[in-house]
Image (cartoon, coloured by chain):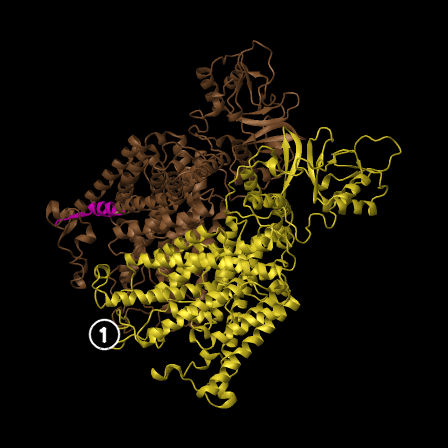
Chain colours: A brown, B yellow
Amino acid sequence: MMDFLEEPIPGVGTYDDFNTIDWVREKSRDRDRHREITNKSKESTWALIHSVSDAFSGWLLMLLIGLLSGSLAGLIDISAHWMTDLKEGICTEGLWFNHEHCCWDSKYVTFEDKDKCPKWSSWSQLLISTDEGAFAYIVNYFMYVLWALLFAFLAVSLVKVFAPYACGSGIPEIKTILSGFIIRGYLGKWTLIIKTITLVLAVSSGLSLGKEGPLVHVACCCGNILCHCFNKYRKNEAKRREVLSAAAAAGVSVAFGAPIGGVLFSLEEVSYYFPLKTLWRSFFAALVAAFTLRSINPFGNSRLVLFYVEFHTPWHLFELVPFILLGIFGGLWGALFIRTNIAWCRKRKTTQLGKYPVIEVLVVTAITAILAFPNEYTRMSTSELISELFNDCGLLDSSKLCDYENRFNTSKGDELPDRPAGAGVYSAMWQLALTLIMKIVITIFTFGMKIPSGLFIPSMAVGAIAGRLLGVGMEQLAYYHHDWGIFNSWCSQGADCITPGLYAMVGAAACLGGVTRMTVSLVVIMFELTGGLEYIVPLMAAAMTSKWVADALGREGIYDAHIRLNGYPFLEAKEEFAHKTLAMDVMKPRRNDPLLTVLTQDSMTVEDVETIISETTYSGFPVVVSRESQRLVGFVLRRDLIISIENARKKQDGVVSTSIIYFTEHSPPMPPYTPHTLKLRNILDLSPFTVTDLTPMEIVVDIFRKLGLRQCLVTHNGRLLGIITKKDVLKHIAQMANQDPDSILFN
Amino acid sequence: MMDFLEEPIPGVGTYDDFNTIDWVREKSRDRDRHREITNKSKESTWALIHSVSDAFSGWLLMLLIGLLSGSLAGLIDISAHWMTDLKEGICTEGLWFNHEHCCWDSKYVTFEDKDKCPKWSSWSQLLISTDEGAFAYIVNYFMYVLWALLFAFLAVSLVKVFAPYACGSGIPEIKTILSGFIIRGYLGKWTLIIKTITLVLAVSSGLSLGKEGPLVHVACCCGNILCHCFNKYRKNEAKRREVLSAAAAAGVSVAFGAPIGGVLFSLEEVSYYFPLKTLWRSFFAALVAAFTLRSINPFGNSRLVLFYVEFHTPWHLFELVPFILLGIFGGLWGALFIRTNIAWCRKRKTTQLGKYPVIEVLVVTAITAILAFPNEYTRMSTSELISELFNDCGLLDSSKLCDYENRFNTSKGDELPDRPAGAGVYSAMWQLALTLIMKIVITIFTFGMKIPSGLFIPSMAVGAIAGRLLGVGMEQLAYYHHDWGIFNSWCSQGADCITPGLYAMVGAAACLGGVTRMTVSLVVIMFELTGGLEYIVPLMAAAMTSKWVADALGREGIYDAHIRLNGYPFLEAKEEFAHKTLAMDVMKPRRNDPLLTVLTQDSMTVEDVETIISETTYSGFPVVVSRESQRLVGFVLRRDLIISIENARKKQDGVVSTSIIYFTEHSPPMPPYTPHTLKLRNILDLSPFTVTDLTPMEIVVDIFRKLGLRQCLVTHNGRLLGIITKKDVLKHIAQMANQDPDSILFN
């Protein structure tokens, strides 16, 4: 009898949508592929070249990902800048200039005229030829809201019509995908195109959202699409996830200009399987992306980082107290935000609200725009606001935040000592307090709408405002009460003692930490922004406090909370499983269920198997020696079984319903004149994972996590007893945490 | 019958020296402990406080490790500085000042007298009251060699007499320990004390070695010793290894002043099991250590880093060519060094040479000192040399390396354009070339001697010299041929185009990368030295090239090579196992061996078991239902079995040689008047790991690595067939790599 099944059948070994991959199998397949190429490479020069190019294809892919995501980030930055300014006016000299470029040469003519710029026309100047008076203000106000609504409408419509996966930050889904789940199209080209366009629109609409999270999604889309150019990565789900981890690092790298922080973010927050080889490649991709972005130079200052800060004065030990206070604030805000945002998102999912995404976006945009225009700190883009808050006041700063008294009679160059606050600072404080309240409230309703939205920037803004308020407060306290023991011993009089910008930065780190529960990557990203090891200790103190406070109020970060809200099958690698249950408590069949459905190795007919397939929905079946002995031989996947039987019926002569299927090496002895047998050993997994029924679940969970299993068989004294799938594990974990176990199903 | 065995028997669950720990069991035990504390915490306030203090004990431990290792590093730095200078002279004003401190105030009197310092006396001034003439030179020469010999003799004698484990860099052994091996005393207090003292002596003796690797060992000793203060860590081998990983990070952090680089080094190079929680804690320990060191301020410049560099000019794209050349040099040097050093060390192990460590050290020291004194670049300490090579020449630099022509007629402040080299530079070049040759040769013989010796610094020195030579060459080329297309288009004439110091830094990274095969951590450490993202690309290009070149000539880094040389049972996590063997090819018993030794669950007597224990040397036995069925019940460790039987014979009435041992839940039915039975279920591991005989070895290796197993049982169709231990896996890997499999045994 010829063995038709020696060559692979198309479809065997692939996965359906919304299924979990088998990491062990994928990695084995890649090793087989690699072995084959290595063996062939000794045969001919061509094969050798193929082998070398295969080895370097990973690096080439990283280079391409870096270039593409860096370019896209540059494009997004430039467009978002221009469109954000479009809400306020246009450049008469060239429509394609944003406000800053338009006023480039007129900026530094004289110090007083610094903010005037004849080439830039506000909408009132254009429409009613004046910039003064109440009517002009109303025209500008109206135009501002109008543009915001237009951008938001475009964004939500595009998302709704072309790529529903383009909404949100994408990080919860990317975490799930990287852990081994398959969501087709989530990282596809339509998602990429629509997400890029709508991200610009959403940012420009002035909503309280950032582009940082979505940039990770964009970079992952780039990675996934570029994978299609390389056989090695196209066909292997595990290898592709290595690339996606690196792409996520590149995404954060361009979002903040922090390549090392990006790699650590990918390692700490996003990735599931992160071998050291990937670490090195991620680093490469992140660097290429960062330098591509820098050569595009979207901020016009040839700086790599989004918020470049340089502080001149050291911090003092007593300042750890306010820094820790900021940490507590950040933790509280994080916990509050997660709870309320999840409650609101749950409401959206379960009520009528979810059916009108366009109206929801327009209403939130309208409210945001109407509230934002009158206050200059809400009107400017959030990243500009953060940048201004981080800034240490120099001698020439015209910002209201730097309006201190006696600002010009100093002899010490650019460094300014602590001074009493002027009227500008006081009014800025009030405006900032209002901004803080507005940001806190509106962000809760914004994150989760059907538009691309990240929350790094809004969280940082909340923290930066709180930090700056506290910083200015401390500064004034130190100025007016410099005789107090604590200030007396640390600050010399007339010196620059407190840096409010540093407080803003620490506050930003604390709030971001409270929401995302990042730790090392957060501190490293912030460190890369300032570039001085000096300020790591304050940042670390705030980040640690914030994480502890937030963890005490709720264990999950925002991404994990959204993963759970959406019911993605994600097995958290950070949490220890702390309960004392055994494998037998979790396995199927339960005590009163019918027996486990098994196949026998050489006694079932095609028809028997087809009946079992049609009567059950299990995604795989254990194969045993005989029903009586229940001794395990292997495991076969439903999908592979269906494809193989179909294929055999079509192509293999004599395979009929009464044909015996056998999984053994040799065909079982048959009486004469029986139909042809069907050998299916090649689709049988001969090394299924087994545990005993008395294995503690903590070990089972550990095995699932570390080896990336889909299922595991349970035996007792050598006899097959049951099966545990990843879904069973997830359900059990949810049950133990007193959650509804049925929420752990993708819906 | 009373069950005496419900309470734990002392000794059960601990390990013998030179044994491998079972990670799964250790982690389970910690989870049990944690569960118990959490459950109790609800009962009383005291238990709650205990629970909270238990949770924070990890952080407290990290703080203590940071403080202690930072202080020790400061102490070592200060002492080594002072003793290094002692070889040349003493400070007459105060014996405890080193050269730099002694000449602190007289240093900047006038530019010309800068190097003269009346308070510092060379030995010739002290002994024969003059510093001029040949005789004075000989006196100084003699004293230099004498001190060197004295220091080296003290170092090697102390190591030999008090703590033989204090020799070498310690990193190979720490890697092995972290992977789960037990070497008692390797991280003990004697090792700590002796290593700290002898490290100072070894560095001061002028040998070609560094203190960076040994500092990691010192920090790990601190970590291990401090673990004894905390129950949580003292009793659990897995938890203790988490602490040691963090301590290794603190070690590198103080060695280079690079906390982030230290954490990544621990993650990439040293650690085996590195959960994210450890990442965050390592980072904390590394920071505390770095700041402790900084507040001790051993370099007197309140800089955190060992080699602080600030470059003023950007690099140009065409410079990537020399940078890649440096990478190739680094790779070649790395491969050459590893080969020759391993060959020499093997010779030392196998011939008479190894029996005279003191003489060997004295001979190498004498040769080093005699060759070093005449050349100023070998006479200075290696870290000073590197510091000088990294340095970008400023206007006031008096170093010979900065002796360019026209050095004073520049109008551009501190920035100097490219200039023709003066006589000083040319003579420095010759001296550096000689230094390069000497360092290359002598380091091969130095690393591996019976004194503490790291090779970060010597490797970096080799690279820095090569880099500086190439850098100066490029600079002169650019100056004399500025009309060449390549220079013409990139460098404007009269500008500072090439920075030789940057070349030195890139060369240092390349050589260090070639020897250790570090990647991300290397680049991050170097980045933390310069503090500018600007120079990451050159560093990365060189590190990548160097790793590729070195890997092409030999897969192993120096630490892995030494692990193999010493036959430590270390299962490399980075290398993929690429062969197509199956579990049945590796398991014991082999085809013609006697059957697997098993215990039955309820039919063997104490005597039977004792016979098996005395006749075999296996460290554990599978327990089966019956010999006929070979159905697996569990696994029991030899050590636990011996302790339990001994204990039962002593304390349990009626247990005699003919007593039946049973591992089942209930005692088997017994005829009347038989002796008491002995229940040993509590020492039985009821969840042994099993794989089928057809499981590919690549998967088995993966399981061993990821779960940290000691052994794994092999089944066929549900029947027990054999066993694979970690040693079998290591032997098999060695066999597949055509190495002697019997070298994989600790000796």
Query: What span is in magenta?
Result: A77-92
The residue drawn where x is 61% and y is 67% is B357
| Residue at disc 1, secondary structure | loop
Looking at the rendered image, the quarter that the C terminus of chain A falls into is top left
Q: Is residue A237 left or right of residue B685?
A: left
Q: As rendered, which of A395 and B63 lies closer to the eye? A: B63
| Residue A369 x/y as whole percent | 26, 43
Q: Amino acid at mark 1?
A: Ser
| Residue A25 x/y as whole percent | 50, 34
Q: Is residue A100 left or right of residue A419?
A: left
B634 lies above or below B109 = above
- Magenta segment includes B467: no
- Magenta segment includes A90: yes
Prevailing secondary structure of the magenta residues: helix
Residue topped by disc 1: B411
Assess disc 1: are there few (<14), some (14-19) or many (≥20) residues with their C-alpha within 10 Å of its C-alpha.
few
A256 lies above or below B631 = below
Res. A214 image quadrant: top left
| Residue B699 x/y as whole percent | 54, 38
Q: Chain of mark 1?
A: B
Residue lying at the far top in this picture: please name it: A673
A728 lies above or below B362 = above
The residue drawn where x is 34% and y is 76% is B424
Res. B662 image quadrant: top right
